[in-house]
Amino acid sequence: MAFTKFGLIPELLRAIEEKGYSSPTTIQAQAIPLILEGGDLLAGSQTGTGKTAAFSLPMMQNLMKKGRSGKVRALILTPTRELALQVEENVAEMGKHLPLKSTAIFGGVNIKSQIKVLSGGIDIIVATPGRLLDLVNQRIVNLSNIEILVLDEADRMLDMGFIHDIRRILKLLPPSRQNLLFSATFSEEIKRLANGLLNSPKMIEAARINSTVDAIAQVIHPVDSQRKAELLSMLIKTNNWQQVLVFMRTKHSANRLAGKLESDGISAVAIHGNKSQAARIKALEGFKNGTVRILVATDIAARGLDIDQLPHVVNFDLPNVPEDYVHRIGRTGRAGNKGEAVSLVCIDEHQYLKDIERLLRQEIPKVVIPNFQPNPSIKAQPISHGRQMAPRRNEANRPRTSFRNFSDKGSKQFKK
Ligand code: AMP
């Protein structure tokens, strides 16, 4: 899936590319087309899912249909000043090639500077409810032209006691508008708010990234692509891993890897779309009862498998969709124990890794295994996705980088 599929205007696509997002997250893939249609939306999603771009991109495109009027036409309410700033920053970045102007409004800072910014003509306000009402009461902000309202982290706003302020703000808005409500949880109170606010909303829910990821020990082993199979064999043997789910990008390479592991004396089976249902069931049974030590799977094949709580998940290749990484590693973690997710990353996958770390908002520790250091003279190559080559835009022109550029932060020595 690419951002180009949504029919977004070139100014937004350019900003997305410059920001370095190569593919949409799940919430973006679901929300962007629905918001572009103009209807109301109720979205279950937490921070870390890419929700900000999920609403800000289509919101700006919808605003651009009419062109600028110098009036405030979009309002994003957030529970905290930090979130208001963060969201406004994202809106400004995504809208940097558009003439739309945005600003963040929150309490605890000098109101005069905010008044000055507002007098310059603002299209999009990102605000905490209390300070916004102050400015409305002082007749500095007029909300009667709002076309799109976003309630971001609505559950937190209610937890923080903003319900009365929100209701006051809603009364100031014109009745005909698009409403988007984002919330991590759906309490009775949120449902009541949604019922009174949203008009036949579409509903979507995204995976909870942070809670999944926190329980998993993650590590990256930088290695050259040609030596990944050898490294994996070594890791399995040295650490005596008994039950490992290995993710691969393509069916062909899954077959090849399973063969190589078998020839190294490690029982392994590949499962992917070309295998019959019976073969998959057999492989899965073997994996569960311990006769098959390694299951090598493509993302699509793994999706239908009833297996999780594994001690080890290995990303032999990094997925090109950052959220797939979270789904993959979510298979590990056993009651009481931390699961372990190991990723073998070659230089070609550097951008995928950056996308994943940005989504997770954390750097994954890099541990170079002795004798498997990447060869610094190897240059990045476009990545093949199955049958056809699908290089990302500008792939060929990407700056040459090497794993030597990875920060040492969080690195630790590999223990034998
Ligand atoms: P959010 O949930 O909106 O706070 O976003 C979480 C993090 O993911 C932020 O650092 C975003 O810049 C990043 N992000 C959002 N969309 C994408 C994407 N499509 N690819 C990679 N990173 C993204």
Image (cartoon, grey):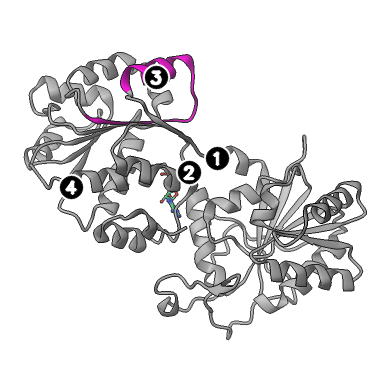
For mark 2, what is the residue?
49
Cα separation between marks 1 and 2: 7 Å
Are dots 4 and 1 in contact, CB under 8 Å?
no
**What are the residue bounds of the magenta stretch?**
177-197
- Dividing the picture into quadrants, the one containing residue 283 is bottom right
For mark 1, what is the residue?
207
| Residue 264 coordinates in the image, percent (x, y) | 88, 72
Cα separation between marks 4 and 3: 33 Å
Name the residue type under label 1: Ala
First-in-chain label (4 vs 1): 4
| Residue 285 coordinates in the image, percent (x, y) | 87, 48
- Dividing the picture into quadrants, the one containing residue 295 is bottom right
Are dots 4 and 3 in contact, CB under 8 Å?
no
For mark 3, what is the residue?
158
How many residues crowd around disc 4 within 10 Å: few (fewer than 14), some, or many (20 or more)?
few
Name the residue type under label 4: Lys
For mark 4, what is the residue?
65
First-in-chain label (3 vs 2): 2
Are dots 1 and 2 in contact, CB under 8 Å?
yes
Element class at badge 4: loop
Name the residue type under label 3: Leu
